[in-house]
Image (tube, rainbow, N blue to C red):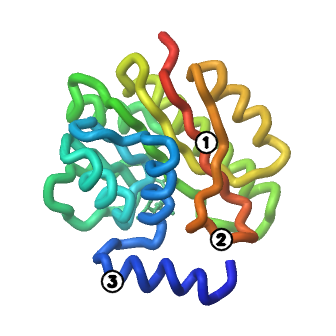
Amino acid sequence: MPRDRRDYYYRKAKEKGYRSRAAFKLKQINERFNIIKKGDTVVDLGAAPGGWLQVAHELSGGKVVGVDILPIEEIEGVETIKGDIRLDSTVEKIKDKIKEGADVVICDAAPSLSGNWSYDHARSIDLAESALECARKLLKPDGRFVVKVFQGDMFPDFLNKARDHFVKVQAFSPQATRKQSAEIYVIGKRLLPF
Ligand SMILES: C[S@@+](CC[C@H](N)C(=O)[O-])C[C@H]1O[C@@H](n2cnc3c(N)ncnc32)[C@H](O)[C@@H]1O
């Protein structure tokens, strides 16, 4: 992304009080796909520092739960859990907070980058697969899912896995994503029965 555009979202986030410029990615995803609706229960995986949580709370006004291996500073109206999304124990902790299930699971989790492209790609796919498993365990029937993936040779297989579990699956790159970034968001609508 050219520096001025990157700075544009950085400045806009500061101005609006969002904790990350990623907040605008979720807004743009939602404008296009209508993922989060008023009153929805939303689970955000890999949520620190909390930009997506702020947007999810604004859009839903319902129950919003954020999970990260890092601590998340308090956001009014949002519950947080410190945990690794790859672990069943974390899924159980989330379930305790949303007994009725989630309408939406969103995941912007990213591995810390090593600089070795295929290694980082594989770790991103691994996280996205964990997020897909969490979504299957947490979502109500017909629930919606958004997950970030770094594109690469394992991406088509991941898309096919997502297609096994959702009626409609699309890939989308919001404007707020850097132009040269390999990240892309996979959107799943209408979870199929387990
Ligand atoms: C790009 S940041 C998320 C930014 C967030 N969407 C926002 O708007 O503030 C990615 C996050 O994924 C988290 N993460 C990476 N691996 C994780 C894992 N296995 N379990 C939980 N969180 C993880 C990182 O700690 C990091 O905070």
**Number of other residues with Cα within 10 Å of mark 2, as a class: few under 14, some 14 to 19, many 20 or more:** some
- At a point 31% along the width and 63% down the height, the residue shown is 71
Which amino acid is tagged 2?
A: Arg
Q: Are marks 2 and 3 in contact (CB under 8 Å)?
A: no
Which amino acid is tagged 3?
A: Glu
Using the numbered discs, state the Cα–Cα distance from disc 3 to disc 1 in whole angstroms: 28 Å
User: Considering the numbered disc 1 on the image, is that residue within a helix, a strand or a loop?
Assistant: strand
Q: Are marks 2 and 1 in contact (CB under 8 Å)?
A: no
User: Considering the numbered disc 2 on the image, is that residue within a helix, a strand or a loop?
Assistant: loop
In this figure, which residue is indicated by the disc labeled 3? 15
**Number of other residues with Cα within 10 Å of mark 3, as a class: few under 14, some 14 to 19, many 20 or more:** few
Which amino acid is tagged 1?
A: Val
Return the residue found at the far top: 193
User: Vertical placement of 56 versus 170: above or below?
Assistant: below
Using the numbered discs, state the Cα–Cα distance from disc 2 to disc 1 in whole angstroms: 16 Å
Q: Position of residue 15 (x, y in %)?
A: 33, 83
Q: How many marks?
A: 3
Left or right of 71, for residue 87: right
In this figure, which residue is indicated by the disc labeled 1? 186
Disc 2 under 8 Å from ligand 1? The reply is no
Left or right of 194, for residue 151: right
Q: Are marks 3 and 1 in contact (CB under 8 Å)?
A: no
Return the residue found at the far right: 153
In this figure, which residue is indicated by the disc labeled 2? 178
